[in-house]
Amino acid sequence: MILIGIMLFSCVKDKEFDAPDLECSDTEFTFISISELKNIYHGETIQIQEDLVIKAYVISSDKEGNFFNTVYFQDEPSNPSDGMQIELELRDAHLFFNVGQQIVIKLKGLYLGESNDVYKIGGVFTSFGNRSVGRLPKNVVFDHVLVSCKENIGIEPTSIAISAINEAMLNTLVVVTDVEIKQEELGETFAIKQEETFRTLVDCGDNELVIVNSGYADFQAEILPDKMGTATGILTMDNNIYQLIIRNVDDLSFNEERCEDLVDEFTSSSIFISEIADPNNNAGARFVEIYNASEESLSLKGWVLERYTNDNSEVSSSIDLSEYVIEGNRLLVISPNAEEFKNVYGFEADVSVVTNSPADSNGDDNLVLVDPFGTVVDIFGIIGEDGSNTNHEFEDGRAVRKIEVDTNNAIFNSAEWLIYNDTGGEDTINQPQNAPLDFSPGVR
């Protein structure tokens, strides 16, 4: 019974226990920089044969389980210029290597490689004849990684906004300012149980940063915070996408109100279709014009131009206009054949799209302009009616909005247009038009 009692009370039930004794080292070495170490790598994993040594400061911690058999380090406790990681076959590495502690790494015999845009050192493993950096066996970890006797003064993370993140900060500790969890992910846990899980940080300008959480982390089942603040973690990269790895939930200091939804999508009665072209002599010279009749420039974020081919009642093709801005009293010219458009008219269209798009109509289709809120604000033609032989046919011709029209109209009115064609109906002009003489793209 005494033995059982000793065993029970000597068991460690959590991670709040003292670190084992580990002698520090004040041995003098000649050091190389992390940058110089990286320069040794030339595309293939290699074993370091020279007596090279680096010194660095620990920035990661596996105490909460979001890191496993990996220690990240950077070259200075503040304002670092470089960082890296070492793969170790060592659990509870935080008991030996505290955040902010200076370590000395003897490189001879270690392997150097790069994976997913991240440099690393450690042991080696081979798969199908290819060498990669693996975990350094536990029995030799402390032959290579020494704890410096230098006082631990802590780490000062580099403060940065998402929009200013750059590759020079990879593998260093950063604090990303003014961020929150993406709206669609609120109410979710930090990670799915036993699965690596990606969550998304976003700032008030809609810039995003991936945050990587382990499904084995102690905080896996906790709910993501629903406010805004700062996120501290190690910046990494995978497939050219920046990622942040936190050490614990306290690395997310979210205690401010969330960003208000930015209203950067607007509707306007001043934006409308001003010309549609189907030249009789050159189908490659087709185009569509959109005009801004107001004095102010307007972003087209969320705006869409749709085409209903012939008598179709469903959208046949569309053009997302989100990346464009129309200046006041100016036109946006859209071409389905950029090269031919320039050859014919002598200048480049503002927007180049594909054939069979809304800008490539053969004259009997219907076009619709939709604002960011899904409302049809302007239309040419009648949806569900083939334009042939009607008052909205512009085959082999053009449809031009009359100069006195200065607002859009969600109901087609042929009286607002001059419509040229070969076989159109009432209120149209049966006079085919040839490019470039009969057309004036870019001019209202």
Image (spheres, rainbow, N blue to C red):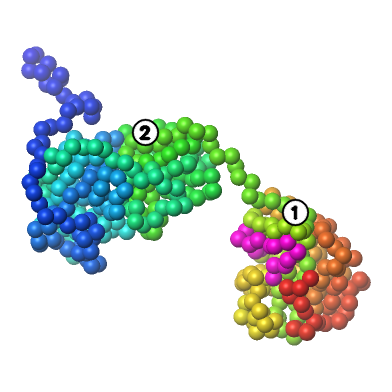
- Disc 2 is placed on an element classified as helix
Residue name at image x 48 percent, y 41 percent: 178
In this rendering, the answer to whether 167 lies above or below 204 is below
Q: CA distance from mark 2 to mark 1?
A: 45 Å
Q: Crowding near pointer 1: few (<14 within 10 Å), some, many (20+)?
A: some
Residue 126 image offset from top left, x and y in percent: 18, 60
Q: Is residue 175 left or right of residue 401?
A: left
Q: Tell whether 272 sits left or right of 172.
A: right
Residue under label 2, please give it.
Answer: 250
**Quarter placement of the C terminus:** bottom right
Q: Which residues are magenta?
A: 318-333
Badge 2: residue crowd in 10 Å (few <14, some 14–19, many ≥20): few
Which quadrant of the figure contains the N terminus? Answer: top left
- Which mark, by number, is residue 268? 1
Residue drawn at (45%, 34%) of the image: 254
Quarter-of-image position of residue 268? bottom right
Does residue 227 sit above or below 5 in this rendering? below
Give the mark nearest the N terminus, 2 or 1. Answer: 2
Q: Nearer the viewer, residue 356 or 113?
A: 113
Q: Amino acid at mark 1?
A: Ser
Residue under the image location 16 percent in, 24 percent down: 11
| Local secondary structure at mark 1 | loop
Q: Position of residue 318 (x, y in %)?
A: 66, 63
Where is residue 256? Give x, y as percent: 50, 33
Is there any visible trace of residue 259 in the rendered image?
yes
Residue in the image at 10% along x and 52% along y? 29
Task: Answer with left or right where residue 205 lies relative to residue 190.
Answer: right
